[in-house]
Amino acid sequence: GKALPIIEQERITNFVGVPTQSWDLVNHPDFEKYDTTSLKAVGGGGAPAPAALVDKVAKSIKKGGPQLGYGMTETNAFGPGNLGKFYTDRPTSTGRAIRPMGVAVWDPATKEVLGVGEYGEIMMSGPMLIRGYWNRPDATAEAIENGWLHTGDGGYIDEEGFLFIKDRIKDMILRGGENVFCSEVEGSIYEHPAVHEVAVFGVPHERLGEEVAVAIKVTDGASLTAEDLWKFLDGKISSFKVPNHVVIMNEELPRNAAGKFLKTALRDMVASGALTPTSR
């Protein structure tokens, strides 16, 4: 909430941060009390933005709209971007590549370039890439292959060249042979009006390998139970993607210094018993 008076007083034009910070801004109970008409764009990067956030920003920012960029330290923060009608029409896309950048999707096993709509690892190339890691030739060789940077992100490119990031490859939940992308599940849960913060993560399961779990911070003054969530998600996403373990929290979810949710910490808290989910 501290950002709102600053935006009004200083006539800030761009609000840049991770999606959770944009979500906090437009959903703050005092948002309508301040003049935010100076804002031309709200967004940033660092993580996929749920479609519900894109819609909320588009409706809340009177003279601007949502924006999203995708870059890494290794690309000098240069990468695909999405904004305006392109973004509201494709709220789950991070946009198209901008020359001279090259973006492709590789099969992680064969290293072959995949076709339209095929899921694999997102790769980047171009003059904006780093030359390498300082005094770490092995790490450089692992990260950059034939001029292409391994991003560690999984996704696909559609027929119009728009890039869709599904999740960090290492964060994808493998449940009984089925791939579950945390960002997709989070996006569906964010559509519930009682939900303020969401973090989906995997927990070990003896037979399936992993099961889907979620931690939710409920909007102040609202109420939500695991049963409410299961009913809400019924038919919205595939049954194997619906979290079997639900933690409802009254305090904010743990974050790192950049504002990203600490899913490993949540997973460890469930494993240690510090958090007790409702399970089915």
Image (cartoon, rainbow, N blue to C red):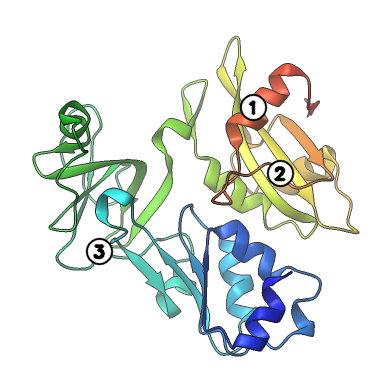
Give the vertical position of 146 relative to 94 (above or below): above
Q: Say what amino acid the circle numbered 1 marks.
A: Arg
In-front residue for pair 118/37: 37
Give the vertical position of 182 relative to 279 (above or below): below
Decide: few, some or many residues near mark 2? Use Cα within 10 Å; few <14, some 14-19, many ≥20. Answer: some
* Residue under pointer 2: 253
* Residue under pointer 3: 97
Separation (CA) of disc 3 from disc 2 = 33 Å
Decide: few, some or many residues near mark 1? Use Cα within 10 Å; few <14, some 14-19, many ≥20. Answer: some
| Labels 3 and 2 touching (C-beta < 8 A) | no
Decide: few, some or many residues near mark 3? Use Cα within 10 Å; few <14, some 14-19, many ≥20. Answer: many
The residue depicted at 54 percent of the width and 51 percent of the height is 258
| Horizontal and vertical percent position of residue 67 | 46, 71
The residue depicted at 39 percent of the width and 69 percent of the height is 82
Q: Say what amino acid the circle numbered 2 marks.
A: Leu
| Horizontal and vertical percent position of residue 228 | 83, 45
Q: Can residue 59 be seen from the camera position used here?
A: yes
Give the vertical position of 149 relative to 79 (above or below): above
The residue depicted at 89 percent of the width and 51 percent of the height is 223
Give the number of callouts: 3
Separation (CA) of disc 1 from disc 3 = 34 Å
Please, which residue is most extreme toward the left here?
146
Looking at the rendered image, the quarter that the N terminus falls into is bottom right
Look at the numbered disc 1 and give the secondary structure of its residue.
helix
